[in-house]
Image (spheres, rainbow, N blue to C red):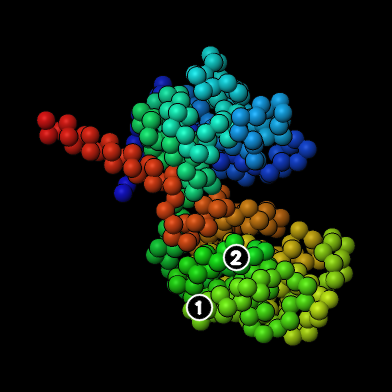
Amino acid sequence: MRLPSLSDFEITGKRLLIRQDLNVPMKDGRVTSQARIRAALPTLQYALAQGAQVIVMSHLGRPKEGVALADQPEVSLAPVAQVLEQLLGQEVALVDQYLDGLPATKAKIVLLENIRINVGEKANDAGLSRQLGALCDIFVMDAFGTAHRAQASTAGVAQYAPAVCVGPLLAAELSALSKALEQPKAPVVAIVGGSKVSTKLEVLEALSQKVDTLIVGGGIANTFIAAAGFDVGRSLHEPGLIEAAKRIRTRVQVPEVIDVVVSDQLQADARAVVKPVEAVTDADMILDLGPQTMAALLPMIQGAATIIWNGPLGVFEFEAFAGGTRTLTEAIAASPAFSLAGGGDTLAAIDAFGAADQISYISTGGGAFLEFVEGKTLPAIAALEARVAQDQLVIHSLEQE
């Protein structure tokens, strides 16, 4: 079903309630990465240029529902409002009391305080959804990063807002994901890293049916190494999923690990040692893929037409174990292939190695990215589709009268 887009509406003078994903990393009360805020800017700038009254809602961190901001100030969106003001060059009014209507303000853009503080948000409460819908003329779902959540601000509000549409950022996300997953240009290479197979088993299973080569890294790679019959020492891995790893190997090419970078401790100043995979001892922790392994992987990446990337290959936050992820990032950046990257750790690696401008599309979603890859229906998209279908049915009925 085609969902209406923001450009389908005349929005001058209209109240737009835009769900964005401004859940940015914070440290000591400061925003440490503006990536998600900057991704939202084109939508906000378009709406402002068209003369709309812009109302933005988002969450930040993991707030407790029903608990006052004074008792959990670390989840306030005040630092985000400050960054938005700087980037937009105009006042952003931060409002913490809004469910019964917005206070008068001269600001053309309003940022609602952390939406997840409201009781009923996570449960997709109908009452809260109705209150949110009453704030606007048009609800704009533009937060791909929360599209996998059936919550009042992502799904419920679509039932009660006067009109609904998809924002430019969400539309671009869905387009890029469809290009990479539904009709990709072959050969397709997927890279999946992370700490545990169990958290990404469905992703690995889904990709094994869609890609030509599946490269694994991080703790996931350790489980595959164990499945190949090698000792992984004290490395993070999941013995209970060794059979699953073997099963995936029968479906898709999973390149063998030749060498690894190990240490006896996980610390920034830990001594890193490169070892052939068969030489790993009981005392070792595998913390990165080795240079010979990366050299063998490079031709596969260079020869790909489509690259899907989620998760680093090692503990790249520590320089001693950053080599594999750095090499991978540089190879993808240099590739002419259509490259799609998603997930928080992946974005952090892209930023760390300065490759943001050389990746074809960087998804702002983490869980939503993974669920889309798995082939699941995203609840927020399903809610928009249901509302559009309902509106079309009403229009059809009126036309028959």
Q: Residue at x 73, y 81 (%)?
A: 231
User: Residue 386's x, y, as percent?
Assistant: 33, 42
Q: Name which residue type carries label 2.
A: Ser
In the drawing, does residue 161 fall left or right of residue 214?
left
Residue, far top? 104
Q: Quadrant of the C terminus?
A: top left
In the drawing, does residue 61 fall left or right of residue 394?
right
In the drawing, does residue 194 fall left or right of residue 168?
right
Q: Which of the labelled discs sits on residue 252, or is there none? A: 1
Residue, far left? 401
User: Residue 287's x, y, as percent?
Assistant: 75, 69
Res. 388 image quadrant: top left
User: Residue 305's x, y, as percent?
Assistant: 49, 70
The answer to whether residue 20 is above or below residue 333 is above
Return the residue nearer the eye: 137 or 84: 137
> Mark 1, residues whose alpha carbon is within 10 Å: few (<14), some, or many (≥20)?
some
For label 2, the SS is: loop
The answer to whether residue 124 is above or below residue 183 is above
Q: Name which residue type carries label 1.
A: Val
Query: Disc 1 vs disc 2: Cβ atoms closer than 8 Å?
Result: no
Residue carrying label 2: 198
Q: Residue at x 48, y 60 (%)?
A: 373
Return the residue nearer the eye: 373 or 350: 373
Task: Give the Cα distance between marks 1 and 2.
Answer: 18 Å
Q: Residue at x 60, y 33 (%)?
A: 65
